[in-house]
Image: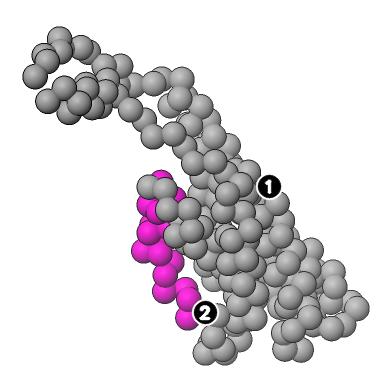
Amino acid sequence: MCQHAPTFPHMIDTESIRLDTHRLRRSALAALYFIALIWLIWLVDGLFNLGLRSFGVYPRHFDGLAGILFAPLIHSSFSHVFANTLPVLILGTAFLYFYPRSAAPGLPVIYLGTGLLVWLFARSSMHIGASGLVYGMVFFLFLIGILRRDRRSIAVSLTVFFLYGGMVWGILPIQHGVSFESHLAGAVIGVGLAFALRRRDPPRAEKRYEWDDESDSEDMDT
């Protein structure tokens, strides 16, 4: 067996860490900007009694088409906007950070596509809130990890399942006053996008350290 002199591997790639930190910060800020917008709209609506609820999606009515664009920004109560805040932050950051190339087409499709499906197929009622967007991101992030099967994607998938797996019941009409149609539409679009975009973001190269190369060489020399 050949012997190799010990070496001191460079374990920390500072430039890679700096770039990753920058991307994570930028992804989180984008999610925070959206959250700030929906909170601002809710506060202004409440303070000035603007009645923005009328800008939600009302299925199969021409006036309800505006809701495809505006409904995710409008919330009926403090508990409503609060319930969507943390999921939008966590899922939006994860989507933008781990799948930046998929996020460019994916997030607009979830945002607008959910409203369009609700307008086409939902009950005749006013549908508002960002929960359709949340469901789209949950189902996308969970399924794409299963489809891609690289370690990082699987880790994200399992984390999303652990945090939000219970939300699957929200696609069923079991809670009065909740737009399960928005949840179901977001979930359907998230699943479709996971299949369509699963190869859009190239897998990250696995980091190898000098001891890995030494171990491989020793195995060959033995």
Relative vertical location of residue 145 with respect to residue 24 in this rendering, above or below: below
In this image, 65 relative to 40: left or right?
Answer: right
Relative vertical location of residue 113 with respect to residue 94 in this rendering, above or below: below
State the residue at coordinates (84%, 77%): 64
Q: Is any part of residue 97 visible from this angle? A: no
Q: Indicate the quadrant containing the C terminus: top left, top right, bottom left or bottom right.
A: top left
Q: Is mark 2 on a helix, strand or loop?
A: helix
Q: What residue type is labelled 1?
A: Ala
Q: What residue type is labelled 2?
A: Gly
Quadrant for residue 23, please give it: top right
Tell me how the rendering is colored. Answer: one colour
Q: How crowded is mark 2: few (under 14 residues within 10 Å), some or many (20 or more)?
A: some
Please provide percent x and percent y for residue 29: 58, 41
**Sequence-first disc among 2 and 1:** 1
Q: Indicate the quadrant containing the N terminus: top left, top right, bottom left or bottom right.
A: top left
For the residues marked 2 and 1, what is the alpha-carbon distance in whole angstroms?
A: 26 Å
Q: What element carries label 1?
A: helix
* Most common SS among magenta residues: helix
Relative vertical location of residue 177 with respect to residue 18 in this rendering, above or below: below
Verify whether residue 51 appears in magenta. no
Quadrant for residue 202, please give it: top right
Please provide percent x and percent y for residue 88: 55, 57
Q: Name the residue under label 1.
A: 104
Q: Give the range drawn in magenta.
A: 152-169
The residue mark sitting in front, 2 or 1, is 1
Q: Mark 2 points at which residue?
A: 170
Please provide percent x and percent y for residue 166: 42, 74
